[in-house]
Image (tube, coloured by chain):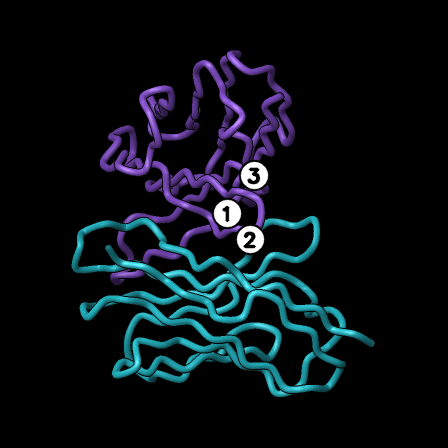
Amino acid sequence: GAGVSQSPRYKVAKRGQDVALRCDPISGHVSLFWYQQALGQGPEFLTYFQNEAQLDKSGLPSDRFFAERPEGSVSTLKIQRTQQEDSAVYLCASSLARTSGIYEQFFGPGTRLTVL
Amino acid sequence: AQSVSQHNHHVILSEAASLELGCNYSYGGTVNLFWYVQYPGQHLQLLLKYFSGDPLVKGIKGFEAEFIKSKFSFNLRKPSVQWSDTAEYFCAVIFMDTGRRALTFGSGTRLQVQP
């Protein structure tokens, strides 16, 4: 597709449920990022992949959060045993690998997760 | 830790007024600087970016930003706003010398333009 796509767009989960959020990056984009955006705040970094390698996961808030990108394209962010504080919009972004030192990221529409 | 600050949380302007949104970051090394915009119901879109060279950067829709290294600032400007500029604006920085390639965002500024 022309842009980054994410599914589902909305997800409601009961506390304690596991959820899986999907990201389809722009074709050919090597780098993929996940961000979490709480209401009224700017996005905050969660994790970063270059191809299938997870190079940075320093932003994951707990071991309940897990991300994968097994074939270097589609990525899934999984949250186990969801808590109310996990309610947020989860954004995916992709970029070409280093191009003249430029790391412009293109964002998807996000998945709004509500944990009841 | 590196951080990004946006001073104005909510700005209300009339059409044709001039706009300046502040952005500061706390870091003395090499940076890549961005302004993103999020229109109601839409995803984040890049307005403009700065990597090197001329510190005055022009973006889409008549926006521009100036990088002042000595002030660690990258303020966004537009000489005359339109109702369609109503949106949330985010300043974002990549702190290059850290080796991290993730964006660090400010908390955003909600701009409301009244017709």
Task: Give coordinates of residue B83: x percent, y percent.
Answer: 76, 72
Q: Residue at x 23, y 36 (%)?
A: A55
Question: Quick check: do tags 2 and 3 share a chain?
Answer: no
The label on residue A107 is: 1
Assign the N terminus of chain A to one quadrant of the image. Answer: top right
Whether the residues at callouts 3 and 1 have beta carbons within 8 Å, the answer is yes
Q: CA distance from mark 1 to mark 2?
A: 6 Å
User: Callout 3 environment at 10 Å: few (<14), some (14 to 19), or many (20+)?
Assistant: many
Residue for point 66% across, 57% down: B39
Which shade of the palette goes to chain B? cyan
A114 relative to B109, above or below: above
A102 w.r.t. B99: above or below: below
Q: Which residue is mark 2?
A: B44
Report x, y in % for residue B40.
Answer: 70, 54
Which is more toward the observer, A28 or A87? Answer: A87
Amino acid type of the residue tagged 1 in the rendering:
Phe
Q: Report the chain holding disc 1.
A: A
Q: Is residue B95 left or right of residue B113?
A: left
